[in-house]
Amino acid sequence: MLRKPFLMILFFLLIIVAADPIHSMAAADKSTILVLSFDGMKNDYVHEHKKALPHLYKLMKQGTEAKNITAVSPSLTAASHSSIATGAKPEKTGLVSNEFKNKNKKLTETENAFWSRLGVPAIWNEARKHGKVTATIAFPGSNPEVTKQDANYAIYYGDTWSPNSLDQLSFHTAKGWKNAPESSRPLKEATFRLKLAGAKNRTIYVLAAAGNHHTYDTFYFSADKTVDQKDPKAGTNQWGSFPIQVKNNLMAGFWFKIKQAGSSFSHATLYRTAVTSANIEGPHGFSKTIQNHFGFFPVAEDSAALKKGWITRREYEDISTRFVNWVEDVSFFIKNRYHPDLLMFYEPQIDHEEHAFLLTDPRQPGYSKQKAKQYANYIDWSYKLADQTVGKTLKAIDRNDKLFVVSDHGMEPMHTSLSPNYELEKNGLLAFKKNGEIDLSKTKAYAVASGTMAHVYINLKGREKGGIVSKRDYQNVQNQVARIFETIRDPRVLASKSILAKYYLSDWWNGVKNGHSSLSATEETATELYNMLKIKPARPYQSVIKAQSKKSEWSHQPHAGDITLVAARGYMMDSNSKSSFHSPSELGNHGGNPERSNLRPVLFVYGKGIPNQRITRRISLIDVAPTIYKMMGIPVPDFVDGQAIKELTR
């Protein structure tokens, strides 16, 4: 009796599958592992404010949390994300800093790690080799323009075609417009020139129309003096966006606001963001699909405009939120349409806020309790925005999916900047020409700073283009640099206080030397040493403490400096060559010892088959990739240094 109804149901199911066989089967059978990275999310902050972060708190209560997780060394964005993506340490990925120098180039020619190839394949590439579908959206290290080892669907930061600006528009009677709107007063127009790097410059026309109150309150932006449906329009103090085709059908664009208008309406103030685009790679038609659905890749933030007073704090938050929403929307769209096995996406707003507003140490310039509280609100905003992303992601995942929420490092407050190049110049190792350029014919060493660490490169003959230091003199110069920074003291505090937490010497042709590193007597370093040795100091912090430290695992990496400097807590490195020991350019920074509590990242895992547990043993960010390999049933490559987290892969 049940045979006929059963056959009818089966018939209709077959019709549904036949209509869209790929998506129907994928939706029914496939699951996705999502990796969501929040740049700079601090482990201690999340726990201290967990009740204000309900979605992250849900992951703590219902998923797996790694309580004792550390970043890699150096604890910098590019280095840590490359290790998350590969399971390998920076010595193998090659990203030993956010900026570094390649050998066989001029001493001052540096490379941006965010636009560099990884030294070993990332998990999205390895998984693709095993027939898995992978996607990356804005994830550091996944730039399809340089990796040559892309995910199936890859979207990354593209070019900045024009910087942001604040312009005064001069309005006069409009002439020659087509499809002009109605206006209670004579239409007025203005123009501005958009200079684009690597593309044809554009003239943008702005048409002002008046409403019922006889006030010019609606503005139309056009490239050809024809008002049509695709042209943006906005009221005073309302956001609008202007897309631009730059080359090869690539879409770029900017967001704008008419912020002020003169009483007689002869002029108005226009703020616009930088003109930005994305690097997009995927199957035929993928780039067009993304651009048609979501428009151009927006700018991630505009702290420079905020500092200049071009925009308000609220407008700054609008810009950052828009970027976050764009990444979210695109990520969830790719998940629902293309059903990837692995989806990795990234949000930077916490890192931006902590760099600018981490004011928690009374030694920091401009510190006051009132200002610290105000700045803390800005950081709170960034974490709440991240928590909203987690909430949206939880709604977007299916019952068979797994979600990894991870960060690359924490953040520490900075009170002082040190300039390694100033110290090198003061000691005769770095020389400048009269025009301010570095004189490579007289320079023996040059430092590339990033966060709280710096690589010092020796201008070696035969290795550097135009090098002047002989191989015989190499070790002497290296030791001279080491002595400079080993003995340097902050003149504003106790004479015995060193600003160097540790340094590493690299013997790049004979391997790495042992015992050529030093720990100096900052309060923090001394405390760590005394605790480690279980000694109660009679007179703590009054003398320089030296001890052999573990050698740097990446000091023989070709991208690493001949001397690597790691600053003590509260000190950051910068490239200023005019002075040392000055106010830091950023209130928060990172790059130092990843074991320190303020620099610890987060790792939460949630979803199908993930137990509710707290892992208290030590885990590293290099353990994320091998864990995902195991979950996907893919052999872990030989270059992986991490270990699959057994509590998640049993």
Image: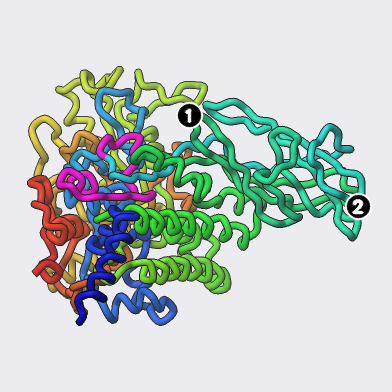
From the viewer's perspective, is 137 left or right of 611?
right
* Rendered location of residue 132, percent (x, y): 20, 50
Badge 2: few (under 14), some or many (20 or more) residues near its Cα, within 10 Å?
Answer: few
Give the quadrant of residue 280. Answer: top left
Q: What stretch is highlighted in magenta?
A: 123-149
The residue under the point 18% across, 47% down is 131
Residue 132 within the magenta-colored segment of the rendering: yes
Q: In this view of the protein, can residue 520 be seen by the observer?
A: no
In three-dimensional space, the C-alpha distance between marks 2 and 1, rounded to whole angstroms, equals 42 Å
* Rendered location of residue 243, percent (x, y): 59, 41
* Rendered location of residue 122, percent (x, y): 22, 46
From the viewer's perspective, is 560 left or right of 326?
left
Give the quadrant of residue 143. Answer: top left
Circle 2 is placed at which residue position?
184
Figure quadrant of the C terminus = bottom left
* Rendered location of residue 88, percent (x, y): 17, 49
Q: In this view of the protein, can residue 1 be seen by the observer?
A: yes
Label 1: which secondary element: loop
Q: Residue 630 carries which label?
A: none
Label 2: which secondary element: loop
Circle 1 is placed at which residue position?
248
Name the kind of residue labelled 2 in the image: Ser
Name the kind of residue labelled 1 in the image: Asn
